[in-house]
Image (cartoon, grey):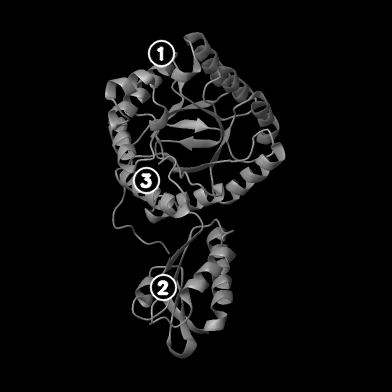
Amino acid sequence: MSIRPFRDINRKKTNVINVGSVKIGGDNPISVQSMTNTLTKDEVATIKQINEIADAGADIVRVSCPDEDSTLALKKITKSINIPIVADIHFHFKRAIEAAMNGAACLRINPGNIGDKNKIKEVIRAAKDNNCSIRIGVNAGSLEKDILEKFKEPCPEALVESAIRNIEILENEDFLNLKVSVKSSDVFLSIGAYRQLSKKINYPLHIGITEAGSFLPGTIKSSIGFGSLLLDGIGDTIRVSLSDDPVQEVKVGNEILKSLNLRHRGVKIISCPSCARQAFPVIDTVKILEEKLSHIKTPITLSIIGCVVNGPGEAAMTDVGVTGGGKGNNMLYLSGIQTEKVITDSIVDKVVKEVQKKVSEIENN
């Protein structure tokens, strides 16, 4: 059962590019990214973390490539994973070339930091020869010196000017397989920069609030920034930047997209905050269900409401629902219809069983 969104988001139709097997831009789904925090040259640890990130629902993963050992490790890493890799390159042009040759699907660079035109041409040639896209990654914390002198401080206009300058470097070499980001740790600065840039270019935009902080404040900042942009139809791929496990970044990113009906993956749980009216321990029940149902990738909606005030209305709009009732007699709903009473101690097992049954029905139709 799907809930019709109150508002359909009119996404800007950007150019379509390929990051490995993932299409970015146009009408393609907004992709979710994260970044490893292992040493890339530690192949075993990096492969393990990438697989964990992928299992959590990431479409693309970025890895840092500060040295030759890291770029050479990509050869083995890319053969052991199932999602495309973006190689994070900052200054040395040879690292970009090596990454493209060793399996990276995309290079995250600032062409202006790479060096002279000949070095840039070599990087572009390597990207073309290896079907590798490029992300121009502009960051408020590392703007070009002359741009900072011109604008006196990081501001939306400064980030946009840096982005346009770097785009033109690639365009002059007839390289158009690119996407762009203009990130800042400041929510308003990021939103302003993306809005301005979106009006000037048709390349896909990778959006993010960089260095957002620890889990709770970082999630809140990212949600505000992403939500403002996504509601404007801006954004083709996202990365939540948290001082936390990369898996948490993926989970938050997916939840942001699910809340806007821009992504449909896994179980979407609608649950109440609990109050004195609750007929069963809602908070603990939801935590257990989140864990037990975390492996499911098929889109499905589940409502867990502790009382009969809002419960029936929410259950009417979900695939599976439970509403709290008196004396431990709670009501189970399937496709919005009351089906049977469930005692409190059986809620988790019953819901898991019904969700799995519903998923099987969806997958077999």
Residue 338: x percent and y percent? 43, 80
Residue 316 numbered mark, or none: none
Residue under pointer 1: 172
Q: Image point 64% across, 27% down: which residue?
A: 71
Q: In the rendered view, tell whether residue 200 sits above or below residue 219.
A: above
Helix, strand or loop for disc 2: loop
Q: Residues within 10 Å of mark 2 (few under 14, many from 20)?
A: some
Q: Amino acid at mark 3?
A: Phe
Residue 188 in sight = yes
Residue 49: x percent and y percent? 63, 45
State the residue in front, 57 or 362: 57
What is the quadrant of the N terminus in the image? bottom left
Residue 308: x percent and y percent? 37, 81
Residue 336 numbered mark, or none: 2
State the residue in front, 138 or 306: 138
Q: Amino acid at mark 1?
A: Asn
The reply to whether callout 2 and callout 3 are in contact (CB within 8 Å) is no
Q: Give the CA separation, mark 2 to mark 3.
A: 32 Å
Residue under pointer 3: 226
Q: Amino acid at mark 2?
A: Gly
The reply to whether callout 1 and callout 3 are in contact (CB within 8 Å) is no
- Farthest residue, direction top: 118
Point out the frontmost of discs 2 and 3. 3
The reply to whether callout 1 and callout 2 are in contact (CB within 8 Å) is no
Q: Image point 28% across, 24% down: which residue?
A: 151
Point out the frontmost of discs 1 and 3. 3
